[in-house]
Image (cartoon, helix red, strand yellow):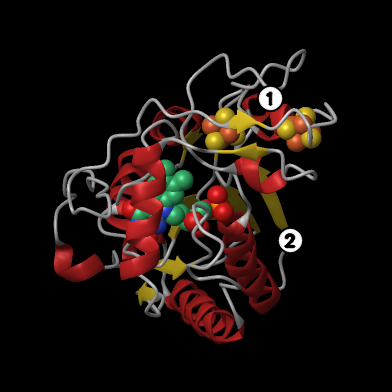
Amino acid sequence: MQIRKIYAVYFSPVGSTGKVTEAVAGVIAGKLGIPAETIDFTLPENRGGGWTFDRDELVVFGTPTYAGRVPNKALPFVQDLFHGDQTPAIPVVTFGNRNFDSSLTELKDELEKNRFCPFAAGAFAARHVFSQTIAAGRPDAKDMEILHAFAEKAAAKLLAAQDADALTRPVIRGGEPVAPYYVPKGLDGQPAKFLKAKPKTDPDLCDGCGTCAEACPMGSISRENTAEVTGICIKCQACVRLCPKGAKYFDDPAFLSHVAMLEKNFQRRAEPETFL
Ligand SMILES: Cc1cc2nc3c(=O)[nH]c(=O)nc-3n(C[C@H](O)[C@H](O)[C@H](O)COP(=O)(O)O)c2cc1C
Ligand code: SF4
Ligand code: SF4
């Protein structure tokens, strides 16, 4: 089938998901010789409108994995803002080297409900935003090789199909249904409860530049007083990772215990998984 344009659409607080989604879209755009455009709906100001895609467009759609699923606070944006019209789609997730569990299946299912036709899907390990050591440097060259091969196969599948109805759905992990959210554990193996944790600010390091407030996908950091978290915190770490002064941090004991548990148990290399 003929595709006229490709969109890389994503929610990506710290950037790995954006990088992976754009890379998949870029390879396919190059292969098909058509333009690619990015729709980044991470920030509140980019979620003002909605988008409907045509059947001769392709959407590569990316979210990170949070607690084994599509981030629950980003799910309504996926459901409400993006609609297809028998539009071919490639759901893509990143995960921080523990496991993507059900996030890819959930994303595929949600896209299908909104009249997209998912025909390929991929889960890519990326730096865990909670840690300096887990999956540091990923996606790396080996991951990008797998990503390229996957995107090329997806392009070939698209070209070979008569129309979107002829595109077969990817079977993710044998067609397992979406499982409940993963319960984070602490070092003691017990559930680590840090739902209410919020970042703190070191006043000696912070110069009030406002980068953290601009980067918060929930719009929860006050622009007038950047030490103040006024709304919901999804623990995405954008403020911590993007602060140029290293002034933002989490000191919630349950959160730190979960990070220590991950650093102890999930240093082995998780490979990307692709489904066509
Ligand atoms: C709240 C939260 C929960 C997460 N849960 C998981 C998880 O269940 N499994 C996993 O492997 N990684 C998990 N991660 C790691 C992210 O999926 C990973 O770092 C992702 O690449 C971040 O994407 P971004 O750079 O686009 O923000 C979690 C991260 C956050 C912030
Ligand atoms: S990004 Fe860092 S230095 Fe800038 S206002 Fe936020 S905490 Fe302060
Ligand atoms: S305050 Fe919470 S939601 Fe906002 S950027 Fe920081 S970690 Fe993410």
Extreme-front residue of the structure = 204
Q: Amino acid at mark 1?
A: Glu
In the rendered view, tell whether residue 211 sits above or below residue 45. below
Across and down, in percent, residue 147 comes to 53, 77
**What distance separates the C-alpha of mark 1 from that of mark 2?**
25 Å
From where the camera sits, is residue 18 visible? yes
Task: Point out the quarter of the image occupied by ligand 3.
Answer: top right
- If you read the primary sequence from the N terminus, does the residue marked by circle 1 or circle 2 appear first? 2
Q: Can you tell which quarter of the image residue 75 is in?
A: top left
In the rendered view, tell whether residue 268 sits above or below residue 52. below
Residue 35: image tag: 2
Please state if 45 lies on the left or on the right of 173 as rendered: right
Q: Are marks 1 and 2 in contact (CB under 8 Å)?
A: no
Q: What element does badge 1 sit on?
A: helix
Residue 45: image tag: 1
From where the camera sits, is residue 86 visible? no
| Mark 1 or 2: the one toward you | 1
In the rendered view, tell whether residue 263 sits above or below residue 13. below
Please state if 30 lies on the left or on the right of 144 as rendered: right
Across and down, in percent, residue 168 comes to 29, 67
Across and down, in percent, residue 261 comes to 32, 59
Residue closer to the observer: 114 or 106: 106
